[in-house]
Every structure is written in C-alpha cells, then in structure tokens.
Amino acid sequence: MITLNLRKKSPVIFVLIFFISAVFWVLPTKADNALTAPPFSQDWTDPALITLDDNWSSAPSIIGYRGDGLTSLVGKDPRDILVADSVPVVDVSANETNPNSLTLGGVAEFEFANSTIALQGSGTADAPYIKIFLNTTNTNKIQVSYDVRDIDGSLDSSVQQVALHYRLDATGDFLNLEDGYIADATTGPSQATQITPIHVTLPLAAENQPYVELRIMTANALGNDEWIGIDNISITANHAPTASLISPSAILENQPAGTTVGTLSATDPDLSDTHTFTLVNSCTGGGWDNASFLIAGAALKSAESFDFETKANYWVCLQVKDNFGLTQIEKHAITILDKPDEIPPSLSYANPVHGSVLLSGISQITIGFGEAVKDDFSAGAANNTENFLLVATGADDSFQTSSCLGGAAPTDTKIVINTVAYQNSFYRSVLTINGGVLLPPGNYRLFVCGTTSIEDLSGNKINNGASDTRITFTVSQIADVTSGKNNSELPATGFPMGLKTTLPAQPRQKIYADLPQLWLEIPKLQVSAPIAGVPLTQTGWDVTWLGKNAGWLNQTAFPTWAGNAVITAHVWDAHNQPGIFYNLKALQYADLINIHAFGQVYTYQVRQTQKIEVNDFSAVLKHEDAAWITLLTCEEYKSEDQTYAARRAVRAILTQVKPEK
C-alpha cells in the first residue's frame, strides 16, 4: 500500500487522499474506449501513446483507472473484486522513469529500455486496473495473452495479486477468469526480474459479441505495494468467413443430374482456415431452388437436368463454415445456359473497334463475346492464342491474308499474340500482343477465328465455322511524332491570306461528327461557335471544312471530361476573312473560356498561352489527369509561300460547373 510517501495507513491520510481524489476526479480526463476487433496488440514501445497525465486518448481501446473504493480491505483477492466501478477515475502518471521511487499508486506509464504501463495499489487506489474494449462480432476462439512484469526493484516487498475479469456490457458486474490469476507477480525486495506470461481463452459467452470489456486488476496489498507491469498485450481470434464464391456459376441446359456447376471457395481473414459448404434455408426469402442442386465436397452439382426455356435463373442459399464453427451465409444466382443449336456465338464488342484510327500504339486487344465460350485452352477455346491472327499490311499497303485457316499471307506481317486471358464473368478475351510493346503506326487486321475455331459451350463455332470475324484498325502516324520518326504537323487551321480558297468535296472518311449540344464561348474574344468532332485519320486531323465551327480533335479527351481536350478553329478562313480564332493569342492568364454541354456551363481559366512549332505534338497532346482544354490555331503567316510558320496553343483548366441559365 502507498500512503503519500508515508509507510503508515493513517486515518488522516485516508481523509486527505479521499479529498484529493474527489477534487481531481472532476478534472477533465481523456480516454479512448473505442471498441477494437481482434487481432489487437499493444507493447507500449511508442512513447506517443501516453504523454500527459490521465490522458489515454492516443492509446486505442485501453483505459487505466485508479479503482478507488472498489474494496475497503487491504490484501483483498482481486478475483473477488467483481463489482463495477461506479465512480471510475481515469488515471495514469505519464512519462515516469523510475518505479523504485514512484509511490503514487494507481496506473503509471514508465519509459525505459522496455517501456510498459504498470499498476500499484495504495490507500487511494484500492484496486487499480486497465480495461480493454473489444468488439468480438463474427469471431470465436478468442485468445488473450499478456506479460505481467515485476518492474519494482525498491525495498518494497508485497504479495501482489493480479486477476483478469470480463463482462459483456458497460455497467454490470464482472466475471473472473481463473486462468488469468497470479497469486504473486513479484519476486521480493530489491528485485525486479519476474515475468509471468498469461494465456487465456475467453469463454463462449464472450464470442460474437458487439461489446466486451476485459479488466486486468491488482489490489492494495499488505505492506508497501510494488509496481506491476502489464505488457505485450495480444488478443487474437478466429474470424468468420466473409464471402463465398461459386465459379463458374452457370450450367448448360440438358446436362444430366450430377453435372458440376462450379467450384466452391470462401474468402476468410484467417488464411489457414479450412471450410465446409452446406445449402441452407437461412437467406432472405428462404432457400429458393436449393432442391435442384447438391454439394459434393467443394463442388456444386446439379440435382436435375435443366431446361433453359422453362427456367433460366436459379437461386441457392450457401453457408460456408470454417474449421472453428463460424459461418457466413450468402445467396448466389445460378444461370442456366441456353444451348442454341442453330445460333453460333458472336462478338459483342472489340477494343479497338473496327475501322478506328488510334492516336497511340497499343499492346492489348479486348474481344467481347455475346455468350459464354470455351476457356479451357482447347482447340475451340477463347484463351487459345491459335484462335486469333493479327497481321499488318506489307509493302503494298493492302491486306492479303484472307482467313485463320489459310494463315498469314507472305506479303503481310504477322504480329505475335503472346497470351490470351479469358474473363469468364464478362465473356471477353484480353490479348497481349507484340511482346507487350506498343504497335507502331500502320494498318492492322485481327482475325477472330471461326474457320479454325472458337466455340461456345454447346460446341457451336463462330460464324458456324464458315468465316472469321475481322477487325481492322489503324495506328496513326501521330504516334511517332514525339519520338521524331516522322514529320507530321499539327492541324493547318489557316488558309492563304489575300485570296479566296475553293474547297474540294469533303471525303467520307473525314466527315465531322455533329455534336448539337456542345458549343464554345470565349467572352473576351466575343467568340461563340458550335463544336464538331474531327476524326483522326492515319495522317492526322483535317480541319479544312470547319468554317465558322470549332473542331474537337477525336482521340483527345472529350470536352468537359477529365484529361486534355484539344479544340481547334481557323485563324483565317477560306473566304479570305479572319477565322474565329484570329485573336486567340490575345488571351491571357486567368481569362475565361466556357464550354456549354448538355445543360451545363463548364468554365475554364487560362493557365498558359504559347507559340509552338508546327510539329510540337507533345505540347498540344500533353497528358492531364484533371479536366483541361487546349485551344489550337495557326500563327505567323508567311506570304512568300502562303504557309503558317507556327501554332498558338492556349491551355486552360476547368474551375467551375454550373447549370445553364
């Protein structure tokens, strides 16, 4: 027992201690009683956990208390002190360094070579303790471990008992855990060597509970109490599985009972757990169609033959149980696949799309199918590289390859397809091509093989095996500009000054996209113009026929979206008149540019205006993660050869979006 540096239990001292206790109890204290879920550990090595007296706010889910008035008896067995602390006094003496000389009693934090918090009984601190606040929901087999250390090397010698309690609410009495009891955690005067490890499995009642408190307590002992460290706290548990999976979750119609639908697996925080699976009726709405299926080990099998036309979708309620008895229940959809004897599989999409022109090279191609296709690496599988053929045009700039069956023509260049990954959930194949190196500029054709051939789960071939599906695309020469491999120029947005220019008919491949809900406004220049979509061809963008419109350069970010959208317009038009971007270089930092789109006004502020070279694609096509626009036009007209020697680029960032008035 500690009595204000006096080694007596004086009634006067008790009164004084009670008075001091009462005064200090009303002072503000800080603590963290947030519930923590296992696993939880604390070894007190971080000095920032406790820096101020009576402040536990940085020590998650642990609070120390002085334990005033929990017992009136000296030497009381803490196993029998199970009442709730009706007037709890949060307590800790922070930043202490010498347990041999500290005689306050209660709870203290000691910072030395092996830092710890510690408990010491006294005339005031009748039963000091720490509480740990837990949420054990979806856990069981909860293991509580900690080291009880004798850290007091003074002449004091007491029988310092330590006990472990628990309760399942915040107000009731505690229950003792006998395996957490230590009859004497100390070694005697002038010694501080004893370490008593505690390992306790919490009772079943503490499992899967939203609120659990643990209390580690000592009590005011006969003689002079010693400091007892509570260190290396570790709380672990088994966790319930968090999800179950059936893969695949589809079965072809007309298959016999006992056909495997898919493999069963579980997601579990405890990676070493094993699992068993059961069909149950505990999901919302019941088990639905459980009777149509059965489980054999880790496989879901059919219990009947299914008919797609009768019923195409089934539901099962699946329970997964780990080897410690915790469960998770989840409903799963099982799809019955039609066997379309006369309907072959087809492509639902491709990236790149057929006929597209790409601004940069690619190293992957994605092909989507309209239904599930084989993915077992067999001759008819969509993850077999032999079921795709990619070629580039040769010297004659035309394709001579006609089919997968015939193979690549000698005059075409065959591009290696390295791997094909099939994504069953999306019915799509992702092709890695050209060794992962971006394709250079050129014309390419991908054959998705029907003649050799990819098959659906019914064995039907693409195009009934009569032909392949072809996807032709172009990588624009723009892709090589920044690396200096060609001399392409940015769009020519100015006509010769001093004369009218007669325009040729606009070719079909250069027709602009009509974007009726998109228009550009530059208040300072009094510009208001519709925006058209300018297609990217192999040689770049041709803005000859823009007239009084602005043109969005396809393959740059769509205006108002994240990224860099490039918009161009004429500086001088074909009618020998100033174009709408004639005064573009007059824009300055912070000037406003508005894009009106789909009932909203997107306001951009100018951040940069610069004169650039005619082939400085890197300045114009600069990558941005935020929403930017780059306005582009010609500059520095040279009358001697009727060309423009430079380009003007004005870059602005989106700063405001508001509804159209």
Image (tube, rainbow, N blue to C red):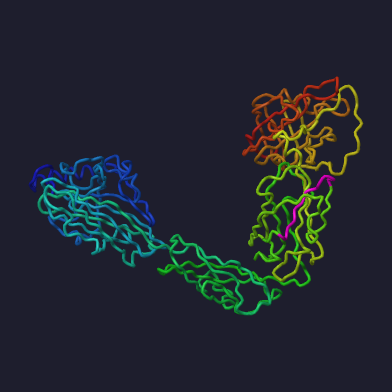
- Above or below, 46 against 568 in this view is below
Q: Give the image quarter of residue 206.
A: bottom left
Residue drawn at (10%, 54%) of the image? 222
Q: Which residue shows up at 19% across the image and 62% down it?
A: 80
Instruction: Determine which quarter of the picture holds residue 614.
Output: top right
As drawn, is 601 to the left or to the right of 499? Answer: left
Residue 579 image offset from top left, x and y in percent: 81, 27
x then y, percent, for residue 527: 76, 29
144 magenta-colored:
no
Q: Is 43 displayed left or right of 568 in the figure?
A: left
The C terminus - image quarter: top right
Q: Is residue 387 magenta?
A: yes
Q: Nearer the viewer, residue 294 or 481?
A: 481
Q: Judge left or right: residue 283 versus residue 570.
A: left
Q: How many marks?
A: 0
Asked if 617 appears above or below 303 in the picture, the reply is: above
Where residue 185 sits: x, y (%)?
A: 18, 55
Tell which of 198 and 393 is nearer to you. Answer: 393
Give the x, y percent position of residue 540: 78, 38
Q: Which residues are magenta?
A: 386-397
